[in-house]
Amino acid sequence: MSFVDHIEELRWHIVRSLVAIVIISIVVFFNIETIFDKVILGPAHTDFVSYKWFCKAGRAIGTEALCLDKINLQFQNTELSGQFMMSFTTSFMIGFVIAFPYVFWELWRFIRPALHENEMKNARGIVLWSSLLFFAGVLFSYYVIAPFTINFFANYQLSPSFQNIITMANYYETMTDLILGMGLVFELPIIVFFLARVGILTPDIMRKQRRFAIVIILVLAAVITPPDWFSIWLVAIPLMFLYELSIRIAARVSRQRTKDPGKELTY
């Protein structure tokens, strides 16, 4: 196929992905009030399920520090069409999250014809694993990271004279960055698998650079969480686990490539 033909083929994959996202977004839009209040604003409510889990866990170890009494947070809308436009952006974001497996499948369909038969076998199950990792990152961020982040900033005050009156757009952007960001970060093992398969990344390189990777993970965790060590380690530990898992994946790929370059690789 010529370059123009490839662009045309990619265009239709993108169009089908957008159609899937739009269809799901329309369904979400007709239920946006309930979804926004129960899902998007869920971590801003004291009865959110994660706060109950944290409180039970704290009491199990003999402390009330993890129990939440209140969240000092009020919201405001500063634009005339703000709430209306927020309905669209929220619907589209949720539509993308739900449609992620199909969107990734369309992307894979575009890439797949360029691969050799043994390479296609090596990547068997990629859509399933990518989807599971993405949803694991989204759920971890929503139920663990987001509650701690919102709780910290909502109750932090420089002076009793100040009230935390947050714009709706700022809250939504924070939630989106956390949820989508962690969903994409959790794709690390998939990326490592393919980089190791083509020989760009090896387990020896990852082991030698482990110290630098830990520093980067801590910096990343500090950026997306409140500035306290508990929240930072709450994010950093799963990311370190993913890094160690990626080393094992790279090692397995490297062994199989050395033993038999044509052998089918699996996760």
Image: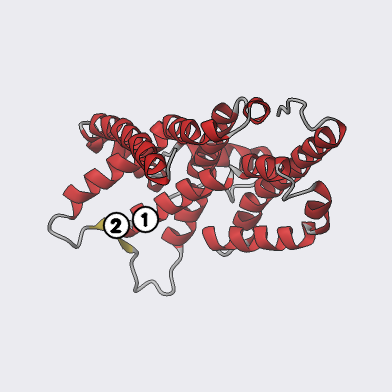
The numbered disc on residue 169 is 2
The secondary element bearing badge 1 is classed as: helix
Q: Residue at x 59, y 51 (%)?
A: 65
Q: Are marks 1 and 2 in contact (CB under 8 Å)?
A: yes
Q: Is residue 39 visible?
A: no
Q: Is residue 23 visible?
A: yes
Image-quadrant location for residue 155: bottom left
Within 10 Å of disc 1 (Cα), the crowding (few <14, some 14-19, many 20+) is few
Q: Residue at x 46, y 65 (%)?
A: 156
Name the amino acid type tagged 1: Glu
Location of residue 254 in the rendering, given as x and y in whole percent from the top left corner: 81, 39
Residue holding disc 1: 173
> Residue 262, relative to residue 249: is it above or below?
above
Q: Residue at x 80, y 47 (%)?
A: 203
Location of residue 194 in the rendering, given as x and y in whole percent from the top left corner: 66, 41
Location of residue 129 in the rendering, given as x and y in whole percent from the top left corner: 59, 30
Residue toward you, 129 or 34: 129
Position of 192 with respect to 24 (left or right) is right
